[in-house]
Image (cartoon, rainbow, N blue to C red):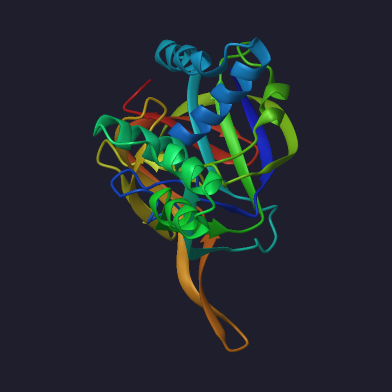
Amino acid sequence: MVNVIFAKIRLPLFSVKQPESFQVMSSMPIPQPSSLIGALAYCLGVISGEGVKALNKVYEMVERGDILAARARPWSDGGAATPLTLSTVILRRFRVVDKAHEKKRRGEVKPAERLSKAVSGGDLVQAKRILEIELTDAFYREYVMGIDMLCAWVVREGVIDPESVKLIPRLGDTESLCTVIKVWSEKCGTAKKTIVETSFPAPALGKARVLEGSFMYMKLCDELRRLVPFIVPCEVRVERSGKVRYPAIRPTAVRIEYEEGARVCETSVGDIVLGVGES
Protein backbone atom coordinates (compact mmCIF):
# COMPACT_ATOMS: atom_id res chain seq x y z
CA MET A 1 0.00 0.00 0.00
CA VAL A 2 1.07 3.57 -0.71
CA ASN A 3 -0.35 6.96 0.20
CA VAL A 4 -1.46 9.31 -2.59
CA ILE A 5 -1.69 13.00 -1.68
CA PHE A 6 -4.07 14.93 -3.91
CA ALA A 7 -4.39 18.70 -4.18
CA LYS A 8 -6.93 20.70 -6.15
CA ILE A 9 -5.07 23.85 -7.09
CA ARG A 10 -6.63 26.97 -8.58
CA LEU A 11 -4.36 28.93 -10.87
CA PRO A 12 -5.42 31.79 -13.08
CA LEU A 13 -2.24 31.22 -15.11
CA PHE A 14 1.04 29.33 -14.95
CA SER A 15 4.19 28.93 -17.02
CA VAL A 16 6.46 25.89 -16.76
CA LYS A 17 9.46 25.96 -19.08
CA GLN A 18 9.71 23.21 -21.65
CA PRO A 19 13.06 21.53 -20.87
CA GLU A 20 14.58 22.21 -24.30
CA SER A 21 13.22 25.72 -24.87
CA PHE A 22 14.85 29.09 -24.19
CA GLN A 23 13.55 30.91 -21.10
CA VAL A 24 9.79 30.19 -21.02
CA MET A 25 8.99 31.09 -24.63
CA SER A 26 7.17 27.74 -24.80
CA SER A 27 5.30 26.51 -21.72
CA MET A 28 4.32 22.99 -20.75
CA PRO A 29 0.54 22.35 -20.86
CA ILE A 30 0.79 20.97 -17.30
CA PRO A 31 3.36 21.14 -14.49
CA GLN A 32 5.99 18.43 -15.00
CA PRO A 33 7.09 16.00 -12.23
CA SER A 34 10.17 18.05 -11.31
CA SER A 35 7.99 21.17 -10.82
CA LEU A 36 5.73 19.27 -8.42
CA ILE A 37 8.76 17.96 -6.53
CA GLY A 38 10.04 21.53 -6.23
CA ALA A 39 6.66 22.70 -4.91
CA LEU A 40 6.67 19.90 -2.33
CA ALA A 41 10.24 20.75 -1.30
CA TYR A 42 9.20 24.37 -0.75
CA CYS A 43 6.43 23.28 1.62
CA LEU A 44 8.73 20.99 3.59
CA GLY A 45 11.42 23.68 3.69
CA VAL A 46 8.96 26.17 5.21
CA ILE A 47 7.71 23.70 7.81
CA SER A 48 11.19 22.54 8.85
CA GLY A 49 12.83 25.95 8.57
CA GLU A 50 15.52 24.52 6.28
CA GLY A 51 14.53 26.59 3.26
CA VAL A 52 16.08 25.54 -0.06
CA LYS A 53 18.14 22.83 1.66
CA ALA A 54 14.95 20.76 1.83
CA LEU A 55 15.17 20.15 -1.93
CA ASN A 56 18.20 17.87 -1.51
CA LYS A 57 16.37 15.89 1.16
CA VAL A 58 13.37 15.50 -1.14
CA TYR A 59 15.67 14.20 -3.90
CA GLU A 60 17.06 11.69 -1.39
CA MET A 61 13.50 10.59 -0.61
CA VAL A 62 12.89 10.02 -4.32
CA GLU A 63 16.07 7.96 -4.65
CA ARG A 64 15.12 5.86 -1.60
CA GLY A 65 11.66 5.23 -2.98
CA ASP A 66 9.85 7.20 -0.26
CA ILE A 67 8.44 9.42 -3.04
CA LEU A 68 7.38 7.28 -5.99
CA ALA A 69 5.80 9.74 -8.41
CA ALA A 70 4.48 13.27 -8.87
CA ARG A 71 1.85 13.94 -11.53
CA ALA A 72 -0.62 16.64 -12.58
CA ARG A 73 -3.52 16.99 -14.99
CA PRO A 74 -6.31 19.50 -15.65
CA TRP A 75 -9.14 19.18 -13.14
CA SER A 76 -12.20 17.19 -14.17
CA ASP A 77 -14.97 16.01 -11.84
CA GLY A 78 -16.56 13.71 -14.38
CA GLY A 79 -18.48 16.45 -16.17
CA ALA A 80 -17.38 18.90 -18.82
CA ALA A 81 -13.92 20.13 -17.85
CA THR A 82 -12.97 23.79 -18.26
CA PRO A 83 -10.29 23.95 -20.97
CA LEU A 84 -6.88 25.50 -20.52
CA THR A 85 -5.69 27.97 -23.14
CA LEU A 86 -2.32 29.40 -24.19
CA SER A 87 -1.38 33.06 -24.40
CA THR A 88 1.95 34.79 -25.01
CA VAL A 89 2.85 38.02 -23.23
CA ILE A 90 5.90 40.29 -23.14
CA LEU A 91 7.43 40.65 -19.69
CA ARG A 92 9.45 43.76 -18.92
CA ARG A 93 11.56 43.44 -15.81
CA PHE A 94 13.89 45.57 -13.72
CA ARG A 95 17.22 43.73 -13.31
CA VAL A 96 19.11 46.12 -11.05
CA VAL A 97 21.13 43.48 -9.18
CA ASP A 98 22.01 41.41 -12.26
CA LYS A 99 23.02 44.39 -14.36
CA ALA A 100 25.03 45.88 -11.52
CA HIS A 101 27.15 42.72 -11.25
CA GLU A 102 27.70 42.63 -15.02
CA LYS A 103 29.06 46.16 -15.02
CA LYS A 104 31.20 45.45 -11.96
CA ARG A 105 32.94 42.55 -13.72
CA ARG A 106 33.88 44.83 -16.59
CA GLY A 107 35.39 47.32 -14.21
CA GLU A 108 32.83 50.01 -15.02
CA VAL A 109 30.84 52.18 -12.66
CA LYS A 110 27.71 50.43 -11.43
CA PRO A 111 24.50 51.62 -13.10
CA ALA A 112 22.94 52.05 -9.64
CA GLU A 113 25.72 54.47 -8.71
CA ARG A 114 25.34 56.43 -11.97
CA LEU A 115 21.58 56.49 -11.42
CA SER A 116 22.04 57.94 -7.93
CA LYS A 117 24.48 60.53 -9.27
CA ALA A 118 22.10 61.54 -12.06
CA VAL A 119 19.18 61.93 -9.66
CA SER A 120 21.18 63.93 -7.13
CA GLY A 121 22.50 66.14 -9.95
CA GLY A 122 19.03 66.80 -11.31
CA ASP A 123 19.70 65.08 -14.65
CA LEU A 124 16.34 63.35 -14.87
CA VAL A 125 16.71 62.51 -18.56
CA GLN A 126 19.87 60.53 -17.86
CA ALA A 127 18.28 58.92 -14.79
CA LYS A 128 15.28 57.80 -16.84
CA ARG A 129 17.55 56.40 -19.56
CA ILE A 130 19.54 54.33 -17.05
CA LEU A 131 16.42 53.11 -15.26
CA GLU A 132 14.33 52.24 -18.33
CA ILE A 133 17.04 51.01 -20.72
CA GLU A 134 20.13 49.79 -18.90
CA LEU A 135 18.43 48.27 -15.86
CA THR A 136 15.55 46.51 -17.63
CA ASP A 137 15.06 43.70 -20.10
CA ALA A 138 12.06 42.22 -21.90
CA PHE A 139 11.22 38.85 -23.42
CA TYR A 140 8.33 36.68 -24.54
CA ARG A 141 6.80 34.23 -22.09
CA GLU A 142 4.01 31.79 -22.84
CA TYR A 143 1.36 31.25 -20.16
CA VAL A 144 -1.26 28.55 -19.75
CA MET A 145 -4.50 30.08 -18.49
CA GLY A 146 -7.30 28.11 -16.89
CA ILE A 147 -9.06 27.35 -13.64
CA ASP A 148 -8.13 24.23 -11.67
CA MET A 149 -5.38 21.62 -11.71
CA LEU A 150 -5.26 18.24 -9.96
CA CYS A 151 -1.83 17.40 -8.54
CA ALA A 152 -0.85 14.06 -7.01
CA TRP A 153 2.18 12.82 -5.08
CA VAL A 154 2.56 9.05 -4.54
CA VAL A 155 4.53 8.45 -1.34
CA ARG A 156 5.23 5.74 1.21
CA GLU A 157 2.84 5.79 4.14
CA GLY A 158 3.83 8.14 6.93
CA VAL A 159 6.72 9.94 5.21
CA ILE A 160 4.87 13.19 4.35
CA ASP A 161 1.99 14.92 6.10
CA PRO A 162 -0.70 15.62 3.45
CA GLU A 163 -1.51 18.95 5.13
CA SER A 164 1.95 20.25 4.18
CA VAL A 165 1.02 20.73 0.50
CA LYS A 166 -1.46 23.44 1.51
CA LEU A 167 1.56 25.77 1.64
CA ILE A 168 2.19 25.63 -2.14
CA PRO A 169 2.36 29.28 -3.33
CA ARG A 170 2.97 28.76 -7.04
CA LEU A 171 3.31 26.16 -9.78
CA GLY A 172 5.92 27.24 -12.28
CA ASP A 173 7.76 30.53 -12.63
CA THR A 174 7.64 33.51 -10.25
CA GLU A 175 4.40 34.94 -11.65
CA SER A 176 2.56 31.58 -11.53
CA LEU A 177 0.82 32.16 -8.21
CA CYS A 178 -1.85 29.67 -7.19
CA THR A 179 -4.28 28.80 -4.39
CA VAL A 180 -4.67 25.35 -2.87
CA ILE A 181 -8.42 24.75 -2.77
CA LYS A 182 -8.58 21.25 -1.32
CA VAL A 183 -6.19 18.53 -0.07
CA TRP A 184 -6.97 14.90 0.61
CA SER A 185 -5.18 11.56 0.62
CA GLU A 186 -5.94 7.94 -0.24
CA LYS A 187 -4.34 4.64 0.67
CA CYS A 188 -3.97 2.80 -2.60
CA GLY A 189 -2.62 -0.50 -3.80
CA THR A 190 -0.09 -1.08 -6.56
CA ALA A 191 -0.11 -3.67 -9.33
CA LYS A 192 1.77 -4.63 -12.46
CA LYS A 193 -0.26 -4.19 -15.64
CA THR A 194 0.28 -4.58 -19.35
CA ILE A 195 -2.71 -2.43 -20.32
CA VAL A 196 -3.05 0.82 -18.40
CA GLU A 197 -5.87 3.37 -18.53
CA THR A 198 -4.85 6.75 -17.19
CA SER A 199 -5.51 10.47 -17.41
CA PHE A 200 -2.14 11.36 -15.86
CA PRO A 201 1.17 11.68 -17.75
CA ALA A 202 2.85 8.28 -18.10
CA PRO A 203 6.46 7.49 -19.07
CA ALA A 204 6.76 6.40 -22.70
CA LEU A 205 9.29 3.66 -21.97
CA GLY A 206 9.44 -0.11 -22.42
CA LYS A 207 7.90 -0.18 -25.92
CA ALA A 208 4.86 1.76 -24.75
CA ARG A 209 2.07 2.02 -27.32
CA VAL A 210 -1.09 4.11 -27.06
CA LEU A 211 -4.11 2.04 -28.03
CA GLU A 212 -6.82 4.65 -27.56
CA GLY A 213 -7.26 8.31 -26.63
CA SER A 214 -5.82 11.72 -27.56
CA PHE A 215 -2.35 12.51 -26.27
CA MET A 216 0.94 14.31 -26.83
CA TYR A 217 4.45 12.88 -26.71
CA MET A 218 6.61 15.25 -24.67
CA LYS A 219 9.97 15.23 -22.96
CA LEU A 220 9.45 16.07 -19.28
CA CYS A 221 11.87 16.35 -16.37
CA ASP A 222 11.04 13.50 -14.01
CA GLU A 223 11.21 13.58 -10.21
CA LEU A 224 15.04 13.67 -10.32
CA ARG A 225 15.19 16.22 -13.20
CA ARG A 226 16.10 13.54 -15.76
CA LEU A 227 14.73 14.14 -19.25
CA VAL A 228 12.25 11.33 -19.97
CA PRO A 229 9.68 10.91 -22.79
CA PHE A 230 6.11 10.98 -21.48
CA ILE A 231 2.68 10.30 -22.88
CA VAL A 232 0.57 13.30 -21.82
CA PRO A 233 -3.19 12.63 -22.11
CA CYS A 234 -4.73 15.79 -23.52
CA GLU A 235 -6.33 17.19 -26.61
CA VAL A 236 -5.14 20.46 -28.15
CA ARG A 237 -7.48 22.09 -30.65
CA VAL A 238 -8.65 25.47 -31.88
CA GLU A 239 -12.05 26.41 -30.48
CA ARG A 240 -14.35 29.32 -31.15
CA SER A 241 -16.33 31.66 -28.93
CA GLY A 242 -18.31 34.12 -31.01
CA LYS A 243 -15.84 35.58 -33.49
CA VAL A 244 -12.80 34.72 -31.37
CA ARG A 245 -10.71 31.60 -32.02
CA TYR A 246 -8.32 30.32 -29.36
CA PRO A 247 -6.17 27.23 -28.67
CA ALA A 248 -7.72 24.97 -26.02
CA ILE A 249 -6.19 22.14 -24.01
CA ARG A 250 -8.73 19.61 -22.74
CA PRO A 251 -8.05 16.60 -20.46
CA THR A 252 -8.44 13.12 -21.90
CA ALA A 253 -7.79 9.51 -20.87
CA VAL A 254 -5.66 7.02 -22.77
CA ARG A 255 -5.14 3.26 -22.91
CA ILE A 256 -1.46 2.34 -23.07
CA GLU A 257 0.08 -1.06 -23.73
CA TYR A 258 3.41 -1.78 -22.02
CA GLU A 259 5.02 -4.92 -23.42
CA GLU A 260 7.30 -5.20 -20.39
CA GLY A 261 4.50 -4.33 -17.98
CA ALA A 262 4.20 -1.23 -15.84
CA ARG A 263 3.87 -0.78 -12.09
CA VAL A 264 0.83 1.38 -11.39
CA CYS A 265 -0.88 2.92 -8.38
CA GLU A 266 -4.64 2.34 -8.47
CA THR A 267 -6.46 5.48 -7.24
CA SER A 268 -10.08 6.61 -7.25
CA VAL A 269 -9.35 8.97 -10.16
CA GLY A 270 -7.48 6.43 -12.27
CA ASP A 271 -4.13 4.68 -12.46
CA ILE A 272 -0.82 6.49 -12.04
CA VAL A 273 2.15 4.82 -13.73
CA LEU A 274 5.08 4.56 -11.29
CA GLY A 275 7.60 2.67 -13.41
CA VAL A 276 8.03 0.48 -16.46
CA GLY A 277 9.25 -3.10 -16.36
CA GLU A 278 9.03 -3.21 -12.55
CA SER A 279 7.40 -5.85 -10.39
Instruction: Tell me: residue 208, above or below residue 193.
Output: below
**Camera-side residue: 264 or 245?**
245
- Res. 259 in view: no
Quarter of the image that includes the C terminus: top left
**Camera-side residue: 91 or 246?**
91
Snapshot quadrant of residue 185 = top right
Measuring from the top left, give residue 158's x and y in whole percent: 64, 11
Instruction: Tell me: residue 250, above or below residue 97.
Output: below
Image point 52% across, 33% down: which residue? 36
Q: Residue furthest right?
A: 182
Measuring from the top left, give residue 178's x and y in whole percent: 66, 44
Image point 46% across, 56% down: which residue? 132
Quarter of the image that includes the N terminus: top right
How many labels were placed on the picture? Answer: 0
Image point 58% across, 11% down: which residue? 50
Snapshot quadrant of residue 59 = top left
Measuring from the top left, give residue 180's x and y in whole percent: 71, 39
- Res. 150 in view: yes
Q: Is residue 18 left or right of residue 162?
A: left
**Camera-side residue: 58 or 51?**
51
Q: Residue furthest front?
A: 121
Q: Residue furthest bottom?
A: 243
Measuring from the top left, give residue 258's x and y in whole percent: 33, 39
